[in-house]
Amino acid sequence: MPEIQLLRPGHAPALLAFEQENRAYFAASVPDRGDDYFVRFDERHRALLAEQAAGVCYFHVLVGADDEVLGRVNLVDVAEGGAELGYRIAERASGRGLATRAVRKLCDLAATDYGLTTLRAATTLDNAASRAVLARSGFTVAGESELCGRPGLSYRRTLAEATAPPGAPTAG
């Protein structure tokens, strides 16, 4: 399985290639990043690393053979023990359970390495694959939402449930 790595400066070329190669694929289910994102990629990458250094976000890449980026799994808006989860997997790597494994691993990292207790996520109703990943990863529907004008669902996961041994009481 590809390795989850915390984003670092050296990931920039492979991450840009990942975003360019999958732009149309991603735009089918999430809003397109726009041309400016690609034109100003290096500047944006540095800004993400600064946010990460400040502890307000944790950006991760899924790195496969030859240091290729196969996905991103991020925690943003970290505050008061919680964060928003976001992820995207390359089209050629989809359908193999990679997103589910990556999200589960990031939930573990969120609890053990970053001290978080709750994660939030959201997806559109028409993104069945993302809804399935969240459900398989222990997220539950928290309510309805709208994402870029499209109907969606918001999700929540309490991480104490993820890290407690089987049969142990959990916070609710």
Image (tube, helix red, strand yellow):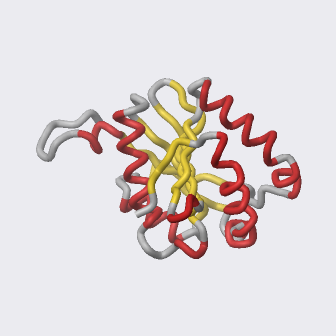
Q: Name the residue rendered at 74%, 58% in the picture.
A: 149
Q: Is residue 26 left or right of residue 6?
A: right
Residue 77 placed where, x, y %? Answer: 59, 33
Q: Residue furthest front?
A: 66
Q: Which quadrant would residue 101 be assigned to in this image?
A: bottom left
Q: Name the residue rendered at 71%, 62% in the picture.
A: 17
- Residue closest to the eye, 125 or 51: 51
Residue 63 versus residue 6 in the image, above or below: below
Can I make out residue 78 in this image?
yes
Residue 98 placed where, x, y %? Answer: 44, 65
Q: Which quadrant would residue 52 be assigned to in this image?
A: top right
Residue 95 placed where, x, y %? Answer: 48, 76
Number of numbered discs: 0
Residue 13 versus residue 119 in the image, above or below: below
Q: Name the residue rendered at 44%, 46% in the picture.
A: 156
Residue 30 placed where, x, y %? Answer: 68, 62
Can I make out residue 122 in this image?
no
Q: Is residue 150 left or right of residue 134?
A: right
- Residue closest to the eye, 155 or 92: 92
- Residue closest to the eye, 57 or 80: 57
Q: Which quadrant of the rendered structure holds the N terminus? A: bottom left
Q: Name the residue rendered at 51%, 70% in the picture.
A: 129
Q: Which quadrant of the rendered structure holds the C terminus? A: top left
